[in-house]
Amino acid sequence: MNKIAVVGLGYVGLPLARLFATKYPVIGFDISAQRVRELQAGKDRTLELSDDLLASVLVDSHIGLDPSSTTMRGLYVSSDIACLQEVNIFILAVPTPVDKYQSPDLSHLKMACETVASCLKKADLVIFESTVYPGATEEFCVPLIEQISGLKYNIDFFAGYTPERVNPGDKLHTIEKVKKVTSGSTPAIAQIVDTLYASVIEAGTHLAPSIKVAEAAKVIENAQRDINIAFVNELSKIFNLLNIDTLEVLEAAGTKWNFMPFRPGLVGGHCIGVDPYYLSQKAREVGYNPEIILAGRRVNDGMGEYVASQFIKLMIRKGLGVAGAKILVLGFTFKENCSDCRNTKVIDIVRGIQSYHSSIEVQVYDPWADPVEVKREYNIEIDNEWKAQTYDGIILAVAHKAFESLDLKAAKNKEGILYDVKGFLKKELVDGRL
């Protein structure tokens, strides 16, 4: 029986490990001992898995999985590399972000490859889920594994690639309900990978003809969304100058059967705001400058600063003093109703407002975000609890459902500004929206 290890227990790895654990013995491995302790206690801080769902597959950490068993199934989580020795299928689901220069950062993937390589045996299979540029699996990962393990690719060990399609916070399109693209390093291995995923993915699978095709499919899924959102963000800037409501325009245009319903907004997170950079770097390596992809990135990366400038202009037009103003930003996560703060563009709004005057006080309220994580990653303080205060201006940056019950009219001063980034509030309540 297959014994699977999922390396990396974040937003992608944990739901995947849980799903496979319904049918197979699964080792969930993470280098964070704290993360492992939390999971062993039945708590997922990302909130991707409920306590009950995690408990339904979790194996007692003191017992573990019996390596000799052919029938046991369940999830055993650990940060001890020794637990990987009896595994024959390794699935790598680690982050692949960009650095401060917007270049792909493969350091997490490199570390995961080194970990797996130290445990690899003949006939083992290594499957990659992390988003990469086309060719990364066989050009970057495989040589690294060969070097450390001493094993030969497609002779002693094999590889597969099946890109993650996890949407954090989405309880409708869960992992088993989204079709999975699969691939393998040989035709026979491709069938094995496809059969493995088909055994747990209710929506079915799509077997790509090569690993490179599967890698490319992943990055263009998100590059396509990025470009389309950049288009409506640019429309929003144009219509703002023309004194036309962008959302009303989109509503009217949306009556045509083939109009695509994209809306303006901030583009952050671990996929849409990152993946295009992986494709564009690879394109430049082969001598092509990707103009449309990078133009879309420039537009979307500038939207936080644009929101800040529009908000300050509204304050000035209304005769409000900017110096010493007290501003509330609602929401900090990269999207609504989830705790994921990776690559959030709300930070650009906060810093953009602060750049206008050092005396501006910006408070952030988000019931989903982890204040400790936000402080560590962005060096700002946020609140999880609502404070009954009044503000000179309020910016709704993230459309958390929890914000529906807030009395924002009472929370702003009589002449204060309410700006809606998401089109979440009734138009008559706001002074401006994207």
Image: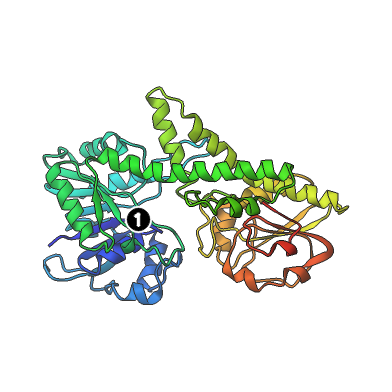
- Looking at the picture, which amino acid does disc 1 mark? Gly
The correct choice, above or below, for 336 with respect to 389 in the image is: above
Q: Position of residue 256 (x, y in %)?
A: 52, 51
Q: Quadrant of the N terminus?
A: bottom left
Q: Position of residue 152 (x, y in %)?
A: 15, 37
The answer to whether residue 269 is left or right of residue 309 is left
The answer to which of 134 and 65 lies nearer the viewer is 134
Residue at position x 64%, y 61% from top? Answer: 382
Residue at position x 35%, y 71% from top? Answer: 40
- Pick out the residue farthest to the right: 319
The correct choice, above or below, for 100 with respect to 313 in the image is: above
Q: Is residue 265 visible?
A: no
The answer to whether residue 249 is left or right of residue 140 is right
Rendered image quadrant of residue 282: top left
Disc 1 crowd, CA 10 A, few/some/many (<14, 14-19, 20+): many
Residue at position x 77%, y 49% from top? Answer: 312
Labels in figure, total: 1
The answer to whether residue 358 is left or right of residue 55 is right
The correct choice, above or below, for 303 with respect to 199 in the image is: above
The answer to whether residue 175 is left or right of residue 197 is right
Residue at which label 1 appears: 8
The answer to which of 12 and 45 lies nearer the viewer is 12
Q: Position of residue 210 (x, y in %)?
A: 23, 40
- Pick out the residue farthest to the front: 256
Q: Could you say whether the residue bearing mark 1 is in a helix, strand or loop? A: loop
The answer to which of 14 and 410 lies nearer the viewer is 410
The correct choice, above or below, for 332 with respect to 213 in the image is: below
Figure coloring: rainbow
